Amino acid sequence: MSTINGQVTDLSANFIPEIWLDYLYELTTETNAFLNSGIIKNDATMGPMLLQRGYYATRPHVQHIDTNLNSQKWDNKHDITVNALDSFTDNQVKIYEAQAFGNSDFDDLITGAKTIDQITSQFATYWASIDEKRLMQVLKIAFMNETIKAAKSFHVGAEAEFKAEDFVKAMARMGDVSAGKPNAMAVNSATYNFMLSQNLIDFTQPSVGALPIGSYNGLAIVQDDQVPLTVDGKTIAYIFAPGSVDYSIATPANGVTVDRDNLKQGGIQAIAQKRVATIQVAGTSADLSVHSQPDTWKEAIDDGTEALFKPTNDVRNISVIEYGFTIDKDFVVPGVNTTGGSKTSTPKSANSVDSSTDGTKAK
């Protein structure tokens, strides 16, 4: 019985010409700039707990002293009343996930392609792409909570053209909290170019020969085309502090394996990776009253239809703001910077099968 399921790479389906050049090994065009911007930080408390049993971890908190209490009068006629501290818990749900890619001995021999090298070199990029997409989903879902939306969101659903006054109003959502002050904003590249056309971006030259760094109102600008942008010019800026999203991953025992089946398809091999991960906005907790099945948490994040997170305690601890606005539609380029569809296309080989037909070869 075969031990490897699924479909391995089959490059031999291509026609074999008289002159066959070396394969070119493609890289994804996704930059994952938002993921690498400093918005995530390794969760020091969850990281060591990821490989312990269970689907989620519950963390206990001791509440801070109630600063709303008036001081008590001190004299020799009144007792001093003792006050208690409250406590609360928050939950982080673990995501268990895996992926595998494979190739065949025959395919490698007849094509000369180094498929297994391409798989090995691109696995880290694959997981970074998964993390970037999940980061975008987690941010979207966090702002579905009405308390978080009211405190940390501005003009999303009532977008008007980007202007400085509205940006300042959005920044007001941080309050006077000294820790976790925003130092960057993530925008779609269309927004960046719109702001550039309006002379809104300041540039700093960090050193001779280095690329200038763009900023707006003192915030470094991160361009990432996975930041939502619709074809009618509606978009979002995520204004954030360093480490405002908690993130942790761990590789379990047998988390990276190479498997072989010497009989199936003339000999195939597969590289499989497994991991456990958590990701959520710092200052939020998994809301198990909204979605009570932690074993389907991954699917719930992918769906993005439920308010899966709630404030852990004080909403002022959340250091991400979303500002919704519109830009000139001339900066919107479908297939390049819009979201909701693939920005890349894969050309078919001359003899590839068109899945929309009855299985005949594409012409």
Image: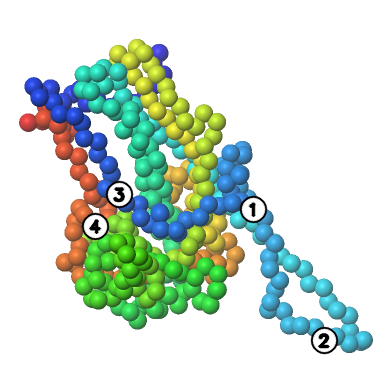
Closer to the eye: label 1 or 3: 3
Q: Earlier in the sequence, mark 1 or mark 3?
A: 3
Q: Residue at x 28, y 27 (%)?
A: 114
Does residue 138 sit above or below 54 in this rendering? below
Does residue 342 sit above or below 208 in this rendering? above
Q: Is residue 224 left or right of residue 97?
A: left
Residue count near mark 4 (Cα–Cα under 10 Å), binned few <14, some 14–19, many ≥20? many
Name the foreground residue: 227 vs 205: 205
Q: CA distance from mark 2 to mark 4?
A: 64 Å
Q: CA distance from mark 1 to mark 4?
A: 40 Å
Q: Quadrant of the C terminus?
A: top left
Q: CA distance from mark 2 to mark 3?
A: 63 Å
Residue highlighted by disc 2: 73
Callout 1 amino acid: Arg
What is the number of the mark on residue 59? 1
Q: Quadrant of the N terminus?
A: top left
Callout 2 amino acid: Lys
Q: Residue at x 74, y 67 (%)?
A: 85
Rendering quarter of residue 194 = bottom left
